[in-house]
Image (cartoon, helix red, strand yellow):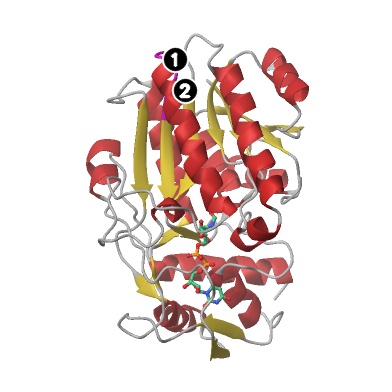
């Protein structure tokens, strides 16, 4: 069965392509290479011995999207990662985010709803919850007004898919709300390749440990948490990738309870920034230079998942630990830097 993975050369996308191939799916990748390199195909092939078909394509080009689906008429499912995803950048370039993240989604859905039956997996984010009132966070937690245009594109994207599923009964969709994806494939053939200065914690940590950055800035230690730093649910990217395959298979096998479902994907455990640093130092043996600075605007104090629905209905549970993820991230960083 042929599956389209948009953004399939990206961090989570490439790891999901590997797990799709491991599960026997035929994969075709669309990527515009704005935030990924074609060489990622080599890494995927090194792991699975199967090089996915790749088509460089900008999903904002309606005609190109239509031509793709004519050429690949046998695509039966789509896992949609392709989007701009930098919270800070989205504040400075809101219209780029609304155009890129939403028009591409609409064009994909227009093609899929023209098929007799299609399965669609949407890359969403726990950012839709904002600062949840209750922890751990369940899928019933209210969606809060977005703190950034990026987060708003995830909220609006979910609403577009919900309304599409309501109209087109044969169309089936699942939105996966990720918590904080980190780590890399144990082969060190693929991993996270942030362009420029990393915005996220773990790539900044590994680049600091590799000597690319002078020191890590910890954005605030005066939060109401056990050590004053923010709490997040850090999930290994390989566990996350496997959840995508399980969600897609759920739809293909008709095990979904409705034609639009939502699942939180996290470990269910929260870790503070200082705990991440401490764990990294233990697994890497590297003393990490860091300083406490002011809070970062838009950060929530704490977010970690209630995993009951994903465990019981999706049949998925994270298996890898924070230490596993940080160890894999460090091994990947050393490989990329030739250390
Ligand atoms: C984690 C914690 C920071 C960097 C965002 C998006 C989310 C998803 C993942 C795309 C926070 C602290 C960070 C640093 C720090 N993105 N930190 N120093 O903000 O939880 O989530 O990225 O899908 O949608 O919202 O992740 O890694 O940026 O921050 O102290 O240099 O680390 O304050 O507490 P975040 P993050």
On screen, residue 116 above or below 171:
above
Farthest residue toward the top?
A: 116
What predominant SS class does the magenta segment belong to? Answer: loop
Under circle 2, the secondary element is helix
Residue behind mark 2: 164
On screen, residue 114 above or below 183:
above
Q: Which quarter of the picture shows residue 93?
A: bottom right
Residue 81: % across, % down: 58, 41
Structural crowding at the residue carrying mark 2, measured as other residues with C-alpha within 10 Å and reported as few (<14), some (14–19) or many (≥20)? many
Residue behind mark 1: 168
Instruction: Give the Cα distance between marks 2 and 1.
Output: 6 Å
Under circle 1, the secondary element is loop
Q: How many marks?
A: 2
Residue 193 appears in the picture as rendered: no
Residue 271: % across, % down: 36, 72
Name which residue lies at 61% across and 18% down.
111
């Amino acid at each position: 069965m042929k599956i389209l993975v948009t953004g399939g050369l990206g961090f989570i996308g490439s790891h999901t392509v590997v797990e799709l191939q491991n599960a026997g799916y035929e994969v075709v990748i669309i990527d515009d290479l704005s935030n990924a390199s074609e060489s990622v195909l080599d890494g995927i092939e090194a792991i699975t011995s199967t090089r996915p078909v790749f088509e460089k394509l900008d999903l904002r080009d309606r005609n190109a999207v239509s031509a793709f689906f004519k050429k690949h008429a046998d695509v039966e499912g789509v896992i949609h990662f392709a989007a701009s995803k930098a919270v800070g950048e989205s504040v400075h370039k809101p219209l780029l985010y609304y155009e890129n993240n939403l028009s591409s989604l609409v064009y994909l859905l227009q093609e899929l709803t023209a098929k007799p039956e299609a399965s669609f997996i949407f890359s969403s984010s726990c950012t839709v919850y904002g600062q949840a009132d209750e922890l751990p966070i369940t899928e019933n937690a209210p969606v809060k007004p977005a703190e950034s245009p990026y987060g708003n594109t995830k909220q609006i994207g979910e609403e577009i898919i919900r309304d599409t599923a309501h109209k087109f009964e044969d169309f089936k969709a699942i939105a996966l709300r990720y918590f904080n994806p980190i780590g890399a494939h144990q082969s060190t053939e693929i991993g996270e390749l942030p362009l420029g200065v990393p915005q996220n914690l773990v790539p900044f940590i590994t680049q600091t440990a590799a000597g690319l950055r002078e020191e890590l800035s910890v954005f605030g230690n005066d939060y109401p948490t056990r050590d004053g730093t923010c709490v997040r649910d850090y999930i290994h990217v390989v566990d996350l990738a496997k959840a995508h395959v399980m969600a897609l298979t759920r739809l293909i096998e008709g095990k979904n309870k409705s034609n639009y479902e939502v699942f939180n994907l996290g470990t269910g455990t929260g870790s503070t920034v200082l705990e991440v640093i401490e764990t990294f130092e233990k697994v890497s043996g590297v003393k990490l230079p860091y300083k406490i600075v002011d809070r970062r605007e838009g950060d929530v104090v704490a977010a970690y998942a209630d995993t009951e629905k994903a465990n019981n209905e999706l049949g998925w549970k994270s298996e890898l630990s924070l230490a596993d993820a940080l160890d894999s991230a460090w091994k990947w960083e050393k490989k990329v830097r030739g250390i």
